[in-house]
Image: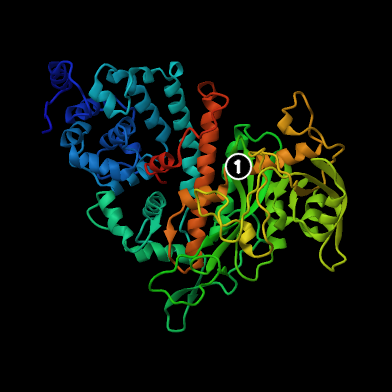
Amino acid sequence: MTRRGGVQDEIAADIASEGFVDITEPRPWDYEYIAQKVADRVFPMHPKEDGYEGRGQEDVMAMARVHVYRHLVEDLESFPDAERHLKKYDGVVSRLGLEKPRSRETIRRSWNEQFDGAHDYIRKQAYDLRDAIGWGMDGVLMAMGVHDQSLSYPEFSPEGIRQSAKEDAYERIRPILTDVVDFERAENVSVPSEDLTDYAAWLARRREMTPESMNAYVADEELDEAPFDPETYRRALRNKEREKTKLRDGRTIWMPPLNPSVNLNDEYGGTDDWHSTTEEGIGRFVQELKDEDIIDGEVPVCIDGSVRDYHKHPDGADDRPEGVYRESYLPTNYGWKDLTATAIIDGRAVVLANVSMVPGDKMPKAVRYLIDRSLDLVDVEAFYADSEFASVANCRHINQNGEDYVFKMRHTTGVKDELEGFTGKAAYTEYTLQEGKSTREHKTTLFAVEKRGKIDVKRGETRHDEHSQAGFEDFGFNEPEGQLTFADLAPDDDVEYVAFLTNKEINSAGIDPAMKPVAHDNKRTVWGQAERYRRRWSIETAFRQIKYQFIPQTKSRDLGTRRFVWMMGILLLNAWAALNIFVRRWASQTFDEDDTDPPVPGKEMLDELAKTEHG
């Protein structure tokens, strides 16, 4: 039962009388002690100077205390959590000077409107109060999320250094997600955009989007009732991709676009549709990395594709939904296709551009967009791609932009003829790339290395055993040859070559990396370029992370809804990559050189982002 001591001294006496006990979780009076400390702090605010001009539902000082308090206490940064906490601890309510527990909407609006210009000041007050609260009381420490006294001096503790870096990193990535993911086209004036975003974030953590999800959402968030009908959310997703049309009878409807293809000729950014919203978010993540000088030179960029299975709605029609391709090897015979350009930065995959394709789209145009958008965002060391992208058009476009490429090459008749003349484990030659009976050609360099190990990837099979990944080879253009790897160095009596095309200068075969050469410059060698290609693709696959960690499974037939969940996956992947890059850079002294595991797991990030303050 909550203790109702009227003053701070009574609480302190109660705590002292407990003696040394095994504390496993904060007690009610631990929270009351913190609330009293907040109440004792004098804030230089005049009641008439708040954003409501003194007309708020609560005294301005009481609401200021609420915001300082929720920044002090662990797990109270989300408005629903703050509402539940106040309802549970009436002693906290009275000590903060509130007349009654306030709703999450009141707290949200107070933060976004009443104290719009005082966010930094309130956070600083909470930070300064930590040292004044007293580090020797275990229950109070737990209430503030501090489980070790050493964390009060983060510069002396590896755990504290990492935690401080995480907090700073979250401050950088949160605003991007909350600002960019909006529902401006939906015009749901009765439902705040922030509520829709809260629900979208919850779905991303649950990785599901079904009609029953709202019931689970209400239960998980301990809400009294559903904040809106699930159809309101689905309509908001659809309408972002649709046009508002007024009928003759006065009714207003939202019409799907006549052409569902992404308009790649529009200027970058903006938020008119989910594609441009994705561009806006990607651009902001890249800029954050530039601002910290993390992107301060050339970066390798990989172009790849993904096929996602179409999860058919049980009540849906059997005919093919808009935007999917016929893929007989998939369980439902249909798939959604995306092309993506991904930069490798500090060992993490950061998406630079994405195109959600529909039947009728031309792949060369989509690839040109990926190349141009990547060049707009970063300085590219080279473009790396599988054999499906090794076309005259793509090679020419990269060449004309003064950039380098390394493409894996299929064993066509022309390539086989050249390989017949190769000797040794690595070789190269000048080569003219031609396309079928066309007169289009491109002069380039063909090089090849001995294939180490053998990974036969066929339609519908997986590149990575732990995931049912359908790669871009499954788009139906050509049979795949497998992914290059040096992991298996067992000798093979029947030597095979893996072939590549490049416009980079090569002047020798170089030294086999299996020989572990020392002080060998391999930049202009066959082995060097093959090793660079291998390293690019050995780092985490962006598509795998998006598909199996960051997007909810939806059975919607609507293309706008599908593009929304894929956009969420891309932005969450970039948030996760940026977060881990920041933490490793800012707390580099706490990591071993060979430690490549991400310091912040994906689930941990999703749980932390659930505490986001929107607005």
Q: Residue at x 80, y 41 (%)?
A: 426
Q: Which image quadrant: the N terminus? A: top left
Q: Residue at x 64, y 44 (%)?
A: 537
**In the rendering, at what x and y percent does residue 368 appear?**
72, 57
Viewer can see residue 202: yes
Q: Quadrant of residue 423?
A: top right
| Label 1 Cα neighbours within 10 Å, binned few <14 / some 14-19 / many ≥20 | some
Q: Residue at x 46, y 77 (%)?
A: 318
Q: Quadrant of residue 18?
A: top left
Q: Residue at x 45, y 21 (%)?
A: 158
**In the rendering, at what x and y percent does residue 47 appear?**
30, 36
Viewer can see residue 188: no
> Looking at the image, is 570 positioned above or below residue 594?
below
Tell me: 202 left or right of 487: left
SS at circle 1: helix
**In the rendering, at what x and y percent does residue 411 appear?**
77, 56
Q: Which residue appears farthest toward the front when viewing the image? A: 493
At label 1, the amino acid type is Val
Tell me: 395 left or right of 9: right
Q: Quadrant of residue 41?
A: top left
**In the rendering, at what x and y percent does residue 52 appear?**
33, 44
> Looking at the image, is 303 positioned above or below residue 132?
below
Q: Nearer the viewer, residue 485 or 262?
A: 485
Instruction: Name the residue beneath numbered marker 1.
Output: 286
Tell me: 254 left or right of 473: left
